[in-house]
Image (cartoon, grey):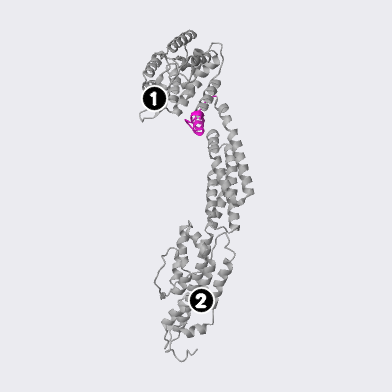
Amino acid sequence: MNTILNNPYRIVGLLVGATAKEQTKQISRLKKYIEAEQDPQDDFSFPALGNLHRTLDSIEEAASKLNLDNDKINAALFWFWNGNPITDEAAFEALKSGDIEAAYEIWDKLITKTDEEGKRFWKPVTEKNYSAFHNCSVLNIIRANGNLHNAIVASLYFLESDLVNKFVSSVADETHKTSKKELQLIFLNQLHSDLEANKKASLPKFLEILNKQEFVAKQDFMKGFVQKPIEQIEHKIETAKNKRKASKANAAKAGQELFTATASDLTQLKSIVGATDLKYTSISDKVANEILQCSIDYFNDSQEKDSSSDYAETAMKLAKQAEALAVGKLTKDRVKDSIETLAEMKDRELSQAIAVLQSIKSAYEEACRQIDKQVDELQYETFGGFGGSQPLRIPKPNVSINWSKVEEMKRSCLAWDKVTEVIREAIPLQNIEKIKRASNTTKVSEYKSLVNFLMSKITYSYKSRIAYISYWETPKTTTSSSTSSTTSRTTTTSSGSSSDFEFAPNAWWILGLVGLIIGAMAGGGGGAVVGALIGAGIGSKFND
């Protein structure tokens, strides 16, 4: 910290409060040492704090900065003051001997206390410890393991107290007038300048420390850090908007750049005015809305161009970033609605595949139910069932059912060649890549279950046509033409997709084609189906 290491008081080897006579004597003494090419001994430059190379010119320059009261006050705020000889001189001797930690402990014990639970508290500023607050602050700023937070708080406690007037009177002429606010602004502005130059602490951290304290100069000091980030953020919003309008294909990049570029400014503004202040909430919502618009424009443009990239994921990432910045209810609601829509659109191909496969499954199960119903009517006469009573079922005589034929009819109840054509059209290979990336585990599980069901009902020749839809399966090298002979008798109601987004343009005619297949295979004349089921031993009255 240059303000401390090259402080005029340090260069001349004096403490704050030294008289004009002491200053003249010390400067003359230093010059003699330097002219004799010897190192000055036993002064208050404290070499343990850092290197100090003194020349005749640097001494003259330092002396000139200790002539005017304003200059002396500026230098005194960042150097040690012997305000209480009883305690301060012991700490100064420790610094002279190079024991920085011993000096720190002397002053720290005077200004803090620790309770039974180990928590540290600040003591009130009194005549016994007011110089310790100042000195401990200076030492905390410069020492290697110093605590910046404690340094700032200790100094502000001191500068906020009425005892600061004794500090001023020990430095400047009694006619010199200043105020607590002026002293605090001098201290904070110089500290901020040094912190920036040395990169010892980030601006947001510095401002966060100040924002938690109460002191008379707070509003005046902080206001300079409010308008600048707001103006910078507004400029960056306008830049992103222009980029988005110029090329919607690059809207995602513009949105990401805006999010990254405004992060530190928003953090700084929030640390100064607080999360609920209108200045912060207003500008944060503006950033969120622009990032969200970048997400929307990029998604719509990519969808219109039928992009093969994972544009839905990119748009969702931007929307999530907008969500993190949204503060006001209107902005939050807009972002929430957009995220919900994107979540649905992101899994569009998966939802479309599920809808088609579910329709096929429902068609198969309905056809099987119709076959079971007709077989049942061949076997039984049904009477009664009026008034809520159970109907009476009486087996018909001389009826024999060819059950293998029943199972065969079920296996071929749908035109599987047409079904596989529908699947290849509705679930093309490129859609499988998007289905693989789907994050909705419930829907993915439903899709896999439907695919497994379908594969269990068709022969190998049909499986080979649509094997790619079982993307999680390892391709098999052996052939198999066996099909499941298990008869499903569970009633399943047909269910279509109820999502808010639309299928791709060809989805509706595909589902319509599924319906035609169902109608052709399951909706024909009952006699034709029944005749195929009756075995050779059927009675003469069933001659169809």
Image location (x, y in percent) of residue 181: 55, 22
Q: Is residue 332 above or below residue 107?
A: below
Closer-to-camera residue (450/244): 244
Q: Is residue 55 above or below residue 264?
A: above
Look at the numbered disc 1 and give the secondary structure of its residue.
strand
Image location (x, y in percent) of residue 527: 51, 85
Tell me whether the residue at label 1 lies in contact with that at label 2, contact meaning CB atoms closer than 8 angstroms: no
**Residue wearing tag 2:** 415
Look at the numbered disc 2 and give the secondary structure of its residue.
loop
> What residue lies at 58% left-to-right and 55% top-to-bottom?
302
Residue 121 vs residue 208: left or right?
left
Closer-to-camera residue (207/427): 427
Q: Which kind of residue does numbered mark 2 sit on?
A: Ala
Q: Which kind of residue does numbered mark 1 sit on?
A: Lys
Q: Say if the magenta span includes residue 200.
A: yes
**Residue wearing tag 1:** 113
Q: Classify 10 Å Cα crowding around label 2: few (below 14), some (14-19), many (20 and above).
A: some
> What residue lies at 54% left-to-right and 80% top-to-bottom?
524
Can residue 383 be seen by looking at this rendering?
no
Q: Is residue 338 above or below residue 361?
A: above
> What residue lies at 45% left-to-right and 23% top-to-bottom?
137
- The magenta stretch is 196-216
Q: Classify 10 Å Cα crowding around label 1: few (below 14), some (14-19), many (20 and above).
A: few
Depth check, mark 1 against mark 2: the one in front is: 2
Closer-to-camera residue (437/518): 437
Q: Say the numbered circle drawn on residue 412.
A: none
Closer-to-camera residue (340/348): 348
